[in-house]
Amino acid sequence: MRPPFRSFAALLLAALFALSAWSAEPPRQVRIGVLAWQGAEEAQVRWSALMDQLEDKLPGRDLVLRHFDLDGMAAALQAGELDFVVTNPGHYVFLEAESGVSRIATLIADASTDPAHVVGSAVVVLDERRDIRALADLKGRTLAAVSQDAFGGYQVAWAELRRLGLNPEQGQPRPVFTDFPMSRVVEAVLNGDADAGVLRACLLERLEQDGTLRPGQLRVLSPRADVRRCRVSAPLYPGWAFAAAPGTPPALSRDVLVALLSLSPDAAGQSWSVPADYHPVHELLQDLQIGPYAFLRETAWPSLWERYWPWVSGLVLMLLAWGAYTLHVEHLVQRRTRELTAAMDERQRLEAQL
């Protein structure tokens, strides 16, 4: 009976050793990058609670929070430094095309209950600017925004201005980009460095609540009656995306999704939902011909003319020269024909006299 006992003891010791080694392994890191649209400090404060909640739901995982601007997040993904990203819908669509990220959840924020209608833009002016009452009055003015690549911070407002016949790309109004954080846009309007500014939806209400701004100090242009939770100047679009990087294991993405959906709304009222339909974001970017649709600018007539006008001009000059030469030759032929006809007539007349 001793050999079986020894075999069992050996197996038991091996199992205990493996269990001890497994328990001694450090937690596996999950690297999550967030877009710091209000600066790195604000991003750390805003998202650290979510990281703590997810760690409670994901035992054995060490969640590492990193914050980026738009370009920094794209570079980190390309370098394989992230497992997940949390970013605005326009930037998500860009990263989806450029880096292959795939959304697993959509953020519901600021008291919204519909993940498809969360992100928007509020175009604000000083309340005493009675010469600017609506978006259409921005023609010939200056418009502050954080970046041309900011979705709620510029692109949504840009699309709405285009719908009204204004084009910031042609200086109507003239954009003034302040870079992140978005508080710089508020400062530009307050200091008179810009006539108006583009803020992310509900930021104005938040700044009024925390005392940064006096209620009514800034006024939203063309507020939409169909949006009641915050004052906005344009339609709402899907919320921020929680997206997996291309190399993230599917099992980890599933575990994170289950954890996100099980979380209760936080103190700011934000929670997570299954992924929303981001087709409206694609339509907006396609209309503006930016992000993954920037190639459309290369096939548009203004772009083609800018790139090929020397060749087109040369061809037009050649055609004009050829046309002028053809007309000249035709004129000579007609003149010689008249001269020959007259000569023949004169010869026939002389012959008839003889």
Image: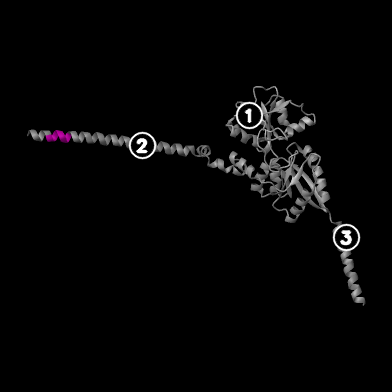
Residue at the (48%, 37%) spot, across then down: 309
How far is mark 2 from mark 3, CA to CA?
A: 92 Å
Q: Quadrant of residue 183?
A: top right
Q: How far from the left and from the top, in percent, is residue 1?
A: 92, 77
**Colour scheme in the image?**
one colour
Horizontal side, residue 200 vs residue 352: left or right: right
- Which residue corresponds to mark 2? 323
- Which residue corresponds to mark 1? 135
Q: Nearer the viewer, mark 1 or mark 3?
A: 1
Vertical arrangement, residue 143 with respect to residue 34, above or below: above
Q: Which mark is residue 20?
A: 3
Q: Quadrant of residue 233?
A: top right
Residue at the (83%, 49%) spot, across then down: 56
Q: Which of marks 2 and 1 is in front?
A: 1
Q: Depth check: give the residue in front, 248 or 217.
A: 217
Looking at the rendered structure, the kind of residue marked 1 is: Leu
